[in-house]
Amino acid sequence: MLGTPAINCTSVSSLARQEEDLRQSSDPKYSHLNEDLHVEVTAFAPPSEAHARIAYALSEVRKYLIPGEEMARLKNATVERG
């Protein structure tokens, strides 16, 4: 399981701005930023255990796929640490 990186809110918004600038650039090196993101989650186990593993994996992945939720989570983590 990956931990939450220690990033303050200023650097998160700065990274978001930088990503948006790269997304709008015509540089082919960053063209993948304009494409859809695909994630595959698989589990090899008996059905009930596989279902539980996939449910847990999807709940973890979801945190990083929805930008608004991730930004709020990082802000809350920063406030709690400070």
Image (cartoon, rainbow, N blue to C red):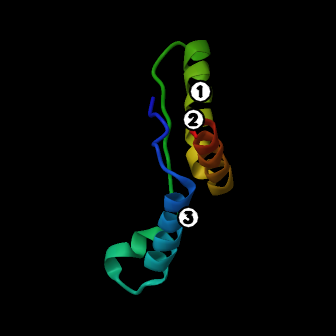
Label 3: few (<14), some (14–19) or many (≥20) C-alpha neighbours in 10 Å: few
Quadrant of residue 27 within the rendered picture = bottom left
Residue 5 located left or right of residue 63: left
Q: Quadrant of the C terminus?
A: top right
Q: Which-is-in-front pick, marks 2 and 3?
A: 3
Q: Are marks 2 and 1 in contact (CB under 8 Å)?
A: yes
Q: Nearer the viewer, residue 11 or 32?
A: 11
Q: Quadrant of the N terminus?
A: top left
Type of amino acid at the residue the image marks with label 1 = Tyr
Q: CA distance from mark 3 to mark 1?
A: 28 Å
Where's residue 19, x and y in %? 47, 70
Where's residue 12, x and y in %? 52, 59
Name the residue carrying label 3.
Answer: 13
Type of amino acid at the residue the image marks with label 2 = Glu
Q: Secondary structure at mark 3?
A: helix
- In this rendering, the answer to whether 37 lies above or below 46 is below
Q: Secondary structure at mark 2?
A: helix
Where's residue 31, x and y in %? 40, 75
Type of amino acid at the residue the image marks with label 3 = Ser
Q: Secondary structure at mark 1?
A: helix
Name the residue carrying label 2.
Answer: 60
